[in-house]
């Protein structure tokens, strides 16, 4: 028996798909890239953008055209909005929450159309289901870069975001399991490991004193890194500015294996806008977080996420975001032009910034970003960096990789055996977001 699985969306979905594969293969299925020969066809969905939802409908329409000519079953799981579940059940044989993977063998056996899905679970019940899910072996999409989920769901309810409705409330994974998985990955040769969660720095709070804090979790991993004597980096994404505490940064400073790279979403540089986004911090609070990062981790690079053209964004509010980018000197910002996400609170508000104006703000902010990120890359010239080689560069005859702070660096080499290992590179040139150098042979 064969299965074909399509995964849409973010790193969390990619990470989840590794566990779904383990579960399905434990039932005796083999993976196939060819949907036409699969007995089981599944999608791990993302409901965050309309485009991703359209893709789900396109996929199932193509698959269902084969119904009648051969027997197969279809399922949908992942991030699905409550309002979409009934609609999707008209096209898929089974629709279920990732937490209900535990019932999948049963559903498959009955080939139910009733969809034993989405019961209103309490936080304790959600935690129980997630514990089962997290105990499955997490397949990694890459040979040296891995993702480890530490938490599922979100309690923040930002007005533009649908995650709290698709993934439920925050549930933390057991710290001993997380540390165990990190150790296994390091022993298996993984060099870059990212802890995943919607709000990693509120890790453990849902357990009300029965679990360690995020800083303590990092400390356990850091200590293991020192003891192991192996070279690897552990990162995390995403922390929330409201919950970022100095003890997290101090722990990162203490250990070599904890990557000096902080991805701290700002979303807007304007306090009034942050209120409309329900981000639960103001620009002063965000400024103090950046100050702590620069003080405690002076070599850290800082990445962020920004939305331009959110409902009601005035020119002055946008100018405040520009000021923030210039002040905080990000190394990278993932800038999104606002589009309402079905299910999120702001989707009920008028999307009143015209598309052309959003594009203009995007372009202006991108230029601001380049002007500050290039200061850092220029400062790399003449210095030596440890690079984790991750593949071929677009330029023939070059390999590329990332510094500890995730700045892309390319260097001349055709030695594929270096992919997945660390090398030293002396930087000779820089561009807006990346650098070029020469490998140093020891
Ligand atoms: S954007 Fe806000 S609501 Fe969405 S996952 Fe992040 S913190 Fe939670």
Image (tube, grey):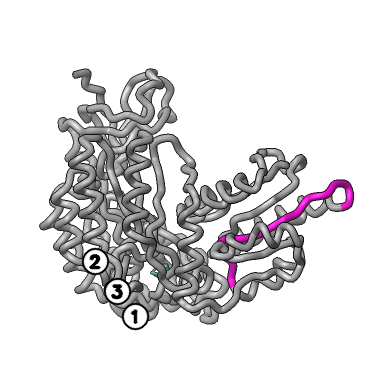
The verdict on label 3 being within 8 Å of ligand 1 is no
Tell whether 108 sits left or right of 79.
right
Q: Quadrant of ligand 1?
A: bottom left
Q: Nearer the viewer, residue 46 or 358?
A: 46
Give the foreground label among 3 and 2.
2
Crowding near pointer 2: few (<14 within 10 Å), some, many (20+)?
Answer: many
* Span highlighted in magenta in the image: 68-81
- Distance from disc 3 to disc 2, alpha carbons, whole Å, reads 19 Å
In the rendered view, would you say 338 is above or below 58?
below
- Distance from disc 1 to disc 2, alpha carbons, whole Å, reads 18 Å
Give the foreground label among 1 and 3.
1
Instruction: Tell me if label 1 and label 3 are in contact, CB under 8 Å.
Output: no
Could you tell me which quadrant the N terminus lies in?
top right
Say which residue appears at 64% left-offset and 54% top-offset. 43
Q: In the rendered structure, find residue 270 and report the number of the disc placed on it.
A: 3
Q: Which residue is mark 2?
A: 244
Instruction: Describe the element under mark 3 as helix, strand or loop.
Output: loop
Tell whether 12 sits left or right of 195.
right
Q: Which residue is mark 1?
A: 275
Q: Is 388 covered by the magenta stretch?
A: no
Instruction: Tell me if label 3 and label 2 are in contact, CB under 8 Å.
Output: no
- Distance from disc 1 to disc 3, alpha carbons, whole Å, reads 9 Å
Q: Is residue 353 visible?
A: no
Say which residue appears at 18% left-offset and 42% top-offset. 226
Crowding near pointer 1: few (<14 within 10 Å), some, many (20+)?
Answer: some
Where residue 162 sits in the image (x, y, percent)?
50, 71
Q: In the rendered structure, find residue 331 and report the number of the disc placed on it.
A: none
């Amino acid at each position: 028996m064969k299965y074909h699985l399509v995964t849409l969306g973010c790193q969390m979905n990619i990470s989840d798909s590794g566990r779904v594969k383990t579960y399905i293969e434990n039932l005796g299925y083999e993976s196939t890239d060819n949907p036409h020969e699969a007995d089981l066809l599944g999608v791990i969905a993302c409901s965050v953008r309309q485009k991703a939802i359209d893709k789900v409908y396109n996929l199932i329409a193509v698959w269902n055209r084969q119904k009648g000519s051969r027997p197969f079953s279809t399922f949908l799981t992942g991030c699905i909005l409550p309002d979409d579940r009934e609609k999707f059940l008209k096209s898929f044989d089974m629709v279920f929450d990732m937490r209900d993977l535990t019932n999948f063998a049963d559903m498959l056996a009955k080939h139910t159309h009733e969809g034993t899905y989405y019961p209103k679970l309490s936080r304790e019940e959600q935690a129980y289901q997630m514990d089962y899910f997290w105990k499955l072996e997490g397949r990694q999409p890459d040979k040296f870069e891995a993702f480890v989920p530490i938490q599922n769901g979100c309690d923040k309810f930002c007005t533009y975001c649908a995650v709290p409705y698709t993934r439920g409330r925050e549930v933390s994974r057991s710290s001993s399991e997380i540390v165990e998985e990190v150790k296994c990955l390091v022993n298996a040769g993984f060099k870059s490991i990212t802890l995943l969660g919607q709000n990693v720095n509120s890790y453990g709070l849902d357990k009300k004193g029965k679990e360690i804090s995020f800083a303590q979790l990092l400390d356990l991993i850091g200590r293991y890194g020192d003891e192991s004597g192996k070279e690897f980096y552990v990162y995390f994404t995403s922390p929330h500015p409201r919950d970022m505490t100095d003890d997290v940064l101090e722990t990162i400073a203490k250990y070599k294996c904890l990557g000096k790279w902080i991805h701290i979403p700002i979303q807007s540089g304007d306090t009034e806008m942050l209120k409309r986004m329900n981000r639960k911090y103001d620009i002063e609070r965000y400024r103090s977080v950046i100050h702590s990062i620069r003080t405690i981790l002076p070599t850290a690079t800082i990445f962020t996420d920004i939305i331009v053209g959110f409902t009601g964004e005035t020119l002055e509010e946008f100018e405040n975001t520009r000021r923030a980018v210039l002040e905080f000197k990000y190394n990278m910002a993932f800038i999104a032009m606002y589009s309402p996400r079905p299910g999120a609170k702001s989707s009920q508000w008028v999307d009143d910034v015209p598309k052309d104006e959003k594009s203009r703000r995007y372009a202006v902010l991108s230029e601001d970003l380049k002007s500050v990120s290039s200061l850092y890359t220029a400062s790399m010239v003449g210095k030596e960096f440890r690079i984790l080689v991750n593949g071929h560069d677009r330029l023939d005859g070059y390999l590329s990789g990332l510094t500890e702070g995730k700045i892309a660096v390319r260097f001349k080499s055709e030695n594929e055996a270096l992919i997945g290992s660390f090398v030293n590179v002396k930087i000779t040139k820089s561009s807006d977001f990346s650098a070029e150098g020469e490998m140093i042979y020891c």
